[in-house]
Amino acid sequence: MQGLWHGVIAPTAIAFAAALAVAAHAQQAPQKPPAPGQQVRLRLANNLCNSMTNQTLTTQLVPPLASTAGAETSINTSLLQRMEQRRDTYFSQLDGLVPFNGLYATGQLDQSFQEDRGARYAFGLEWELYDQGRGESRRQLDRIRLDNKVQYLQVLRDTEARQVQEQLLAVDQMRNKLLATLYQREVAAVRPVLERRRQELAAGRATRAEVAEIEYKAERAALRTQHYVNARDVLVYPQAQDLINRIEDVQLHPERELTERAVSRSPEIQLQTLLAERAAFIPSPEDNLSVRLYLERTKEFDRGPSHIAGVRVRIPLDRDRNRPQLQQASRELYEEQKESMRAALSQKLSLLTERLRLKQNDMRLLQAESRMVRQKAELSCYRLEHPVASLPDTADRDVEEFTLRLVELQREILTARLDVLEVLTQVSAMVKPREPQELYSLRPAPR
């Protein structure tokens, strides 16, 4: 038994001593590069960990967007400003027109063919109160004033609609310019990851599905870059670019206040008020009434001159009894239209206000997710520098995935800012504030 024990222990001790010698020699000899397939620290991961605080990746502000379009590109904005400035002057000039007073100078002269008779003449003044005189002139002038005001408001309304379209197009072009920049960054971020995945696939550390996922992200970023880089250039409003980076601090004024301001400045409601006045121009018996006052000097053939003063009256004998009811029905119709438009403005403002707050909340959620992913990325960077034996060594993969997600979140956050700006533009088009303070206030920026 003792011989058997020595027979087993001796070879084991020799093998153990040989292993220790090999290990010591391995520590003294220079280490060979790891074979393909072994865990290696990624060059990309190291670079990302060193640049986690880089402004390009961490910023959540829209960079300045250059535009080659000049200020004259905004045709409708400048036109609308001129129309708003001229409207009161134009309306006051219309109201300042004076109707014809109805005063006529009359004259008549003829000669008789009979030798014993001479000439006959008449001349004087005639004041026409109705028919083709003072009353009808005032009525026609009121109708002309009304028609011109209606046409002006219609042109103003159409110009406002085109201006809103122009502003929304500018926001969309800002989005295109921004996405062109952000997708270029994503192309630069995905390219080294794709190269690493292909190396891992050749070494047996990655599957074809994993490589296909990164190839899809690379192709998507490249195609989107190609599309947005070639987008046409339009005017970028400087005031919008300044506001967009504080868009989360925008607080709209109470809806009741905004509704009152939108109603008072709505061309549509002002049009209904003017159209209600058209009921006064429904034909009436007064249109056929004629009252004339005259003063004349006359001479008839062999008679001597004489002075005449008098009045001529022509009164229509019919009467339309339904006219007052028709006028009242017309006024009530337009008043109901005004109430309907007021309710529609209130409803649309309420929907846009809710949508603006929802877009702001979505942006804050994206910012919160970005902070969470950043914390995970920083932890993965720490694990790269200080591996933990009890945890699987996937920190390099985690850094890649978290960083690509941060690039995507940056794009989503910045485009969310433009989404909020787009809704704010629609609200502004309804309220028509003279100054931004009439529409919203900005909360103090956090320190």
Image (cartoon, rainbow, N blue to C red):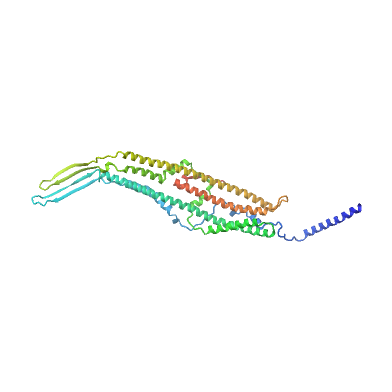
Horizontal and vertical percent position of residue 267? 40, 46
Residue 358 visible in the snapshot: yes
Image check: 446 left or right of 121? right
Q: Residue furthest left?
A: 116
Q: Residue furthest right?
A: 2
Horizontal and vertical percent position of residue 248? 54, 47
- Name the residue rendered at 65%, 53% in the picture: 399
Horizontal and vertical percent position of residue 419? 52, 49
Report the label total: 0
Foreground residue among 110 and 305: 110
- Name the residue rendered at 40%, 44% in the picture: 269
Vertical relation: 306 (above or below) 48: above
Image check: 414 left or right of 292? right
Foreground residue among 377 and 4: 4
Q: Quadrant of residue 322?
A: top left
Horizontal and vertical percent position of residue 420? 52, 48
- Name the residue rendered at 52%, 55% in the picture: 176
Residue 433 visible in the snapshot: no
Image check: 291 left or right of 116? right
